[in-house]
Structures are given as structure tokens and as C-alpha cells.
């Protein structure tokens, strides 16, 4: 089985949870002996994982470039995995033309239209409601889901939203969350840890918003109660405005990129993440639970992770309560230890690799074996492919011709 992954980024597991998830998906396919080529429109990144060490070929590609047609036709993948809907928009029509029998899979990473809608509500200072979901981003993303043979969803909350609100058929969706080993039985104990930690890629706007909430509203309350404590802020790609928040006197320490996220989380006593908007599953909590580090977050932060289990710390959307819960976790070893065990339970019951990998492979093989019937039953997808992708196709071809006359 040949697999072509098309992405607008290179895999950066040290920068984002999305990078870690992509590596997990690639690992499943490699374990089956599938050959993989990872193609990206992004420039060279010094933080990119060296995929060739795993035996994965890489290919630089460009949008609006007919070279991709020859490349795809020569490779003839059995499966094409689009990393986010933007990649499918740019290259889906080319795959249809050059590789018509390839199974097209979309990995949403998280539901972009949900994240954008929540962000807009926060920006306008009001509560989110479902009407916010009806946006241009939603129309693009849902159309992309229909045009593909299968869409991978990391959150059951988002699957329910797609089915109940957007009426997307369950036959087009597949749940596959983070894929993890068992949580370590023993973690660094309470008395060998100190300080608070916040971590997250700063290109991702929910993390920047949460950092501001900590700086302005939450950390002053914690610092007043625990004067010796510090909050260490980690995250890839910190901008100048992020670094300007650094204040050693207040114990608000901006560290920037963490070369080893697990190491810095393992040494902290409590992780803080007052996320006001976002979607999908948050990798920072996976890391914190694997490290045995309790956390305080919001309902959006914990969304899709518990499945009926108790959180590894506390969940609240009120800043004062957030600070109080963080202080309790930091000072009370008994409460802290119980939260640590609850985190291990979430990892071990909800995110075990063996619970999902075979179902994923079986689902892909079933679609491949019944591809004609599967597409026949998805008339909406075929209709969208015929109309909307023709407009994308002709715009792309126009840009191709323009670029030939005016080289960039």
C-alpha cells in the first residue's frame, strides 16, 4: 500500500500536538508495511522531524504548480491523506484527475470552524452559540469532509457536532484520538517538584489568549497566596509581545521553546491552561497526565478527554475559582496525588493505541475494497467535487499560467 500525505506544514512534534498526532498516524501505517511519501508546501523548518529516519520519503510541492500532477501520476498512491482541509482544497482536484482510485482521507486535526466560531464569540465578549458555526470556514471545511472518502476526527464531541448540527453522515467519519502507551506507574513525587507551568505553541491563538489571561487575571491571585512560586511559560515560536510579558519580580517567567516538553512538565507541580476558545484535544494535557502533573483548565480545555472520568486536577471557567483550585493543588499533597492518579486513568482508559489502530486499518481497507459503492452513496460529496472543485481547478490553472509568464 502506497500512501501520500499532503500537508501545508512539516511535522514538528516538539512544537505542537498536531505534529505528535501525525507521527502517531504515520507509525500505524508504517507498522503495516505501507510505504509513505510526505509532501509539503512549507519551506524548510529547523524544527521539523526527520521523517527519512523512519523510512518516509519527503517531497516539496507548491500550490498552483502543474509539477504536482506529474508527481502524483507517477507515484499513484493507494491512499492520500490530506493534513487539514486547506490541503484538500488545493490538491483534491488534482488527486481526482491523476489518482482517481486513491482513497482520500482528511485529517481535520481539530474542527477549524468550531475553533474560529468560539474565537469570534470571545473577541466580541459574548457567549458562544451554535449559530456562530454557520460561517465561510464551516462551509469550506464541511465541503472538504464530503469530498473525501473518510475524515479522521480526534474528538467525539466534534463528531457529535458534525452529525447533529451539520447532518454529516457517520459513514464519512472515524474517531481516532491520540494514540498512547500506558501511563508510567511511578512519576516524580510531589515534594520533588516546584513551580507552575503553562505550555503551548504561540502561533496557536488560544495559547496566546490563555497566556494573557494568566498574566492579567489569574497569576496575581496565585502569586499573592504563594509568594515563592513561579509560573514558567513555554511555547514554540514566541513573538516579541510574548517575551515582553516576562517579569522575574512577579515570578512570571517566559522561557520560550521547550526542547523537551516532558522534562519541563515533569519538574513542575501544576500545569495551568485557562483556554477560552479552541477545538479538538489539547496535547498539553496528554503530556501533563503522562508526566503525572495535575492541571487546572476550563471546560473547553478538557473537552473530549474525560469520557465520564474525573479530571486530573480541576475544571472551571471562573478566574477566581481557577486560582483557588491551582493554589489547593499546589499546596495539598493529598489532593495533588489523587489528581495525578486520575490523569493516569484517563490515559489508560481513553487513549490506548491498541484500542484504535486495528479499527482504523480495517476501516481504510473496507473503504478501499468498496470504493465505488462508497462514493455512489455519497452523492453530496460527488456534487461538491464536481462544482466547487471546478472553480478551484480553473483558478489554480489561471495562476499557473500567470506564474509562467511572471516567474516568482
Image (spheres, rainbow, N blue to C red):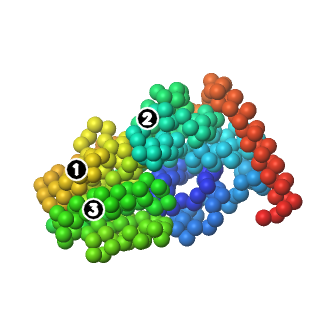
Residue 149 is left or right of residue 21, and the answer is: right
Residue furthest to the bottom: 249
The residue shown at (27%, 47%) is 318
Looking at the picture, how far across and down is residue 194, in whole percent?
Answer: 22, 68
Say what secondary structure mark 3 lies in.
helix
- Please report whichever mark, 3 or 2, sits nearer to the chain's N-terminal start: 2
Separation (CA) of disc 3 from disc 1: 12 Å
Q: Is residue 254 above or below residue 402?
A: below
Asked whether disc 3 touches disc 2, contact meaning CB atoms under 8 Å apart, the reply is: no
- Residue under label 1: 321
Residue 252 is left or right of residue 278, and the answer is: left
Separation (CA) of disc 3 from disc 2: 29 Å
- Residue under label 2: 129
Number of marks drawn: 3
Asked whether disc 1 touches disc 2, contact meaning CB atoms under 8 Å apart, the reply is: no
- Residue under label 3: 219
Say what secondary structure mark 1 lies in.
helix
Looking at the picture, how far across and down is residue 20, in whole percent?
Answer: 46, 56
Looking at the picture, how far across and down is residue 366, in whole percent?
Answer: 56, 32
Separation (CA) of disc 1 from disc 2: 24 Å
Crowd class of label 2 (few under 14; some 14 to 19; many from 20; radius 10 Å): few
- Please report whichever mark, 1 or 2, sits nearer to the chain's N-terminal start: 2
Residue furthest to the front: 125
Q: Which of the 4 quarters of the picture holds residue 40?
A: bottom right
Q: Is residue 31 visible?
A: no
Crowd class of label 1 (few under 14; some 14 to 19; many from 20; radius 10 Å): some
- Please report whichever mark, 3 or 1, sits nearer to the chain's N-terminal start: 3
Say what secondary structure mark 2 lies in.
loop
Amino acid at each position: 500500500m502506497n500512501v501520500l500525505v499532503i500537508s501545508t506544514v512539516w511535522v514538528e512534534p516538539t512544537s505542537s500536538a498536531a505534529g505528535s498526532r501525525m507521527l502517531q498516524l504515520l507509525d500505524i501505517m508504517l507498522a503495516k508495511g505501507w510505504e509513505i511519501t510526505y509532501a509539503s508546501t512549507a519551506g524548510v523548518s529547523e524544527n521539523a522531524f526527520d521523517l527519512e529516519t523512519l523510512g518516509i520519503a519527503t517531497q516539496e510541492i507548491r500550490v498552483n504548480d502543474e509539477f504536482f500532477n506529474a508527481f502524483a501520476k507517477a507515484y499513484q498512491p493507494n491512499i492520500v491523506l490530506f493534513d487539514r482541509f486547506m490541503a484538500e482544497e488545493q490538491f483534491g482536484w488534482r488527486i481526482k484527475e491523476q489518482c482517481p482510485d486513491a482513497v482520500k482521507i482528511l485529517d481535520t486535526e481539530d474542527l477549524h470552524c468550531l475553533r474560529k466560531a468560539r474565537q469570534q464569540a470571545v473577541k466580541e465578549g459574548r457567549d458562544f452559540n451554535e449559530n456562530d458555526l454557520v460561517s465561510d470556514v464551516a462551509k469550506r471545511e464541511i465541503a472538504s469532509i464530503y469530498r473525501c472518502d473518510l475524515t479522521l476526527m480526534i474528538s467525539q464531541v466534534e463528531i457529535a457536532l458534525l452529525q447533529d448540527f451539520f447532518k454529516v453522515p457517520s459513514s464519512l467519519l472515524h474517531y481516532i484520538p491520540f494514540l498512547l502507551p500506558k501511563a508510567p506507574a511511578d512519576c516524580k513525587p510531589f515534594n520533588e517538584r516546584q513551580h507552575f507551568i503553562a505550555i503551548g505553541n504561540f502561533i496557536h491563538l488560544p495559547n496566546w489568549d490563555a497566556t494573557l489571561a494568566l498574566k492579567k487575571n489569574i497569576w496575581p491571585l496565585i502569586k499573592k497566596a504563594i509568594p515563592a512560586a513561579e509560573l514558567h511559560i513555554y511555547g514554540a515560536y514566541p513573538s516579541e509581545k510574548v517575551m515582553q510579558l516576562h517579569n522575574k519580580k512577579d515570578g512570571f517567567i517566559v522561557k520560550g521553546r521547550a526542547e523537551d516538553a516532558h522534562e519541563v512538565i515533569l519538574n513542575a507541580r501544576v500545569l495551568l491552561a485557562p483556554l477560552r476558545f479552541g477545538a479538538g484535544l489539547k496535547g498539553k494535557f496528554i503530556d501533563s497526565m503522562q508526566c503525572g502533573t495535575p492541571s487546572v483548565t476550563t471546560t473547553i480545555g478538557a473537552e473530549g478527554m474525560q469520557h465520564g472520568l474525573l479530571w486530573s486536577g480541576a475544571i472551571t471557567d471562573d478566574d477566581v475559582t481557577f486560582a483557588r483550585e491551582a493554589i489547593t493543588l499546589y499546596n495539598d499533597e493529598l489532593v495533588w496525588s489523587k489528581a495525578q492518579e486520575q490523569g493516569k486513568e484517563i490515559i489508560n482508559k481513553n487513549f490506548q493505541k491498541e484500542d484504535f489502530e486495528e479499527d482504523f486499518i480495517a476501516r481504510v481497507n473496507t473503504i478501499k475494497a468498496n470504493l465505488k459503492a462508497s462514493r455512489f452513496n455519497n452523492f453530496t460529496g460527488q456534487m461538491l467535487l464536481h462544482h466547487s472543485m471546478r472553480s478551484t481547478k480553473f483558478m489554480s490553472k489561471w495562476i499557473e499560467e500567470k506564474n509562467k509568464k511572471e516567474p516568482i
